Image (cartoon, grey):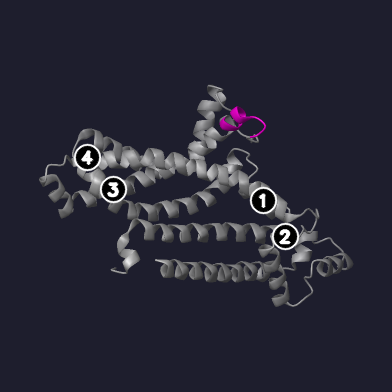
């Protein structure tokens, strides 16, 4: 198991290095000089030259890449072209907000989707199971931003139960923080819960058709007992895969939801940096999102080894 874990860790590190090269190269192949883009087309040649020298843009590309990577590893990616604000603290502050939003949304989705998915599978021949299955299909088709707009119209504008947007620091006002977090987290969780419930239903249905579960029931266990003792662990393997993909999708989906609810997260920093032409900040934020996505995939692979004994023994 340790060797397999080390192998996946090596794949993770190589993937991060390959992604860093692609992100750096993509930002460099964009049309125009980064210094000229940052200062605008009306900037003088002297000002552009000073900015290029100040940020090392006149040095060889390989040296620029190594400097950027050194900054990422030491958590000091540099300062912005125009505002001269440090990029690292900005990303750290915004990343906390995004992680709170994403993790809360994922937990909400799991808490709702797992029992609903199991119920849909166990009751797939009954009316209630069919109705819940149809509702979950509708939920899959609703974009998160549209769900957010509807929730704002109902719970913030008409009922005035929660604010329509903004962010509150948890330590300053816990209740205000929960009220501000409620709608954006539910908006993201609704769609993910619908998708996850469909996969849970499919995985549990597959398990219910397995011979070992029929044997367990033939020995006297009730269907729910047989599923609980022998089926859910096997059904969890494909569900974990979907959870990993959904968590990565939530990171990207949070970019839109942060704009809808005016939340100062990583997504809003990325869009603000694009508008302000702060290319170094854009490049670093994109890299943070890529590393987060790869890290999630690595953790999912590691979780496979814990859930499925066949992977630890190499039997499949």
User: Disc 2 marks which residue?
Assistant: 76
- Secondary structure under the numbered disc 1 in the rendered image: helix
Quadrant where the N terminus sits is bottom left
Residue 111 vs 244, above or below: the answer is above
Disc 1 from disc 4: Cα separation: 45 Å
Disc 3 from disc 2: Cα separation: 45 Å
Is there a contact, CB below 8 Å, between mark 3 and mark 2? Answer: no
Q: Which is more toward the observer, 137 or 20?
A: 20
Q: Where is residue 177 in the image (x, y as percent from the top left)?
A: 60, 32
Of all residues, the one furthest to the top in this rendering is 159
Q: Mainly helix, strand or loop, the magenta region?
A: helix
User: Disc 3 marks which residue?
Assistant: 232
What is the span of residues highlighted in magenta in the rendered image? 171-178
Q: Quadrant of residue 97?
A: top right
User: Disc 1 marks which residue?
Assistant: 92
Disc 2 from disc 4: Cα separation: 53 Å
Disc 4 from disc 3: Cα separation: 10 Å
Counting residues from the N terminus, which is met first, the one under dot 4 or under dot 3? 4
């Amino acid at each position: 198991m340790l060797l397999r874990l080390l192998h996946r860790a090596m794949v993770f590190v190589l993937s991060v290095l390959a992604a860093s090269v692609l992100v750096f190269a993509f930002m460099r192949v964009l049309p125009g000089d980064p210094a000229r883009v940052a200062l605008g087309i009306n900037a003088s040649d002297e000002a552009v030259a000073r900015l290029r020298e100040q940020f090392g843009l006149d040095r060889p590309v390989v040296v620029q890449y190594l400097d950027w990577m050194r900054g990422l590893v030491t958590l000091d990616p540099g300062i912005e072209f125009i505002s001269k604000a440090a990029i690292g603290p900005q990303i750290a502050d915004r990343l906390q907000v995004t992680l709170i939003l994403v993790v809360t949304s994922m937990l909400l989705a799991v808490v709702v989707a797992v029992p609903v998915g199991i119920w849909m599978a166990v009751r797939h021949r009954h009316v209630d199971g069919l109705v819940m299955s149809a509702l979950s299909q509708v939920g899959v088709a609703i974009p998160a931003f549209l769900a957010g707009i509807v929730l704002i119209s109902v719970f913030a504008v008409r009922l005035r139960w929660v604010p329509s947007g903004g962010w509150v620091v948890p330590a300053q006002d816990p209740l205000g923080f929960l009220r501000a977090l409620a709608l954006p987290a539910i908006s993201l969780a609704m769609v993910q819960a619908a998708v996850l419930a469909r996969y849970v239903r499919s995985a549990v249905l597959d398990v219910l058709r397995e011979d070992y579960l029929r044997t367990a029931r033939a020995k006297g266990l009730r269907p729910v007992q047989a599923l609980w003792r022998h089926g859910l662990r096997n059904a969890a393997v494909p569900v974990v895969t979907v959870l990993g993909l959904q968590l990565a999708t939530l990171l990207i989906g949070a970019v839109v939801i942060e704009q809808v609810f005016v939340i100062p997260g990583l997504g809003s920093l990325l869009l603000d940096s694009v508008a302000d032409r702060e290319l170094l900040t854009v490049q670093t934020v994109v890299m943070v999102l890529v590393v987060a996505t790869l890290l999630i995939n690595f953790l999912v692979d590691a979780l496979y080894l814990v859930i499925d004994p066949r992977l630890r023994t190499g039997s499949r």
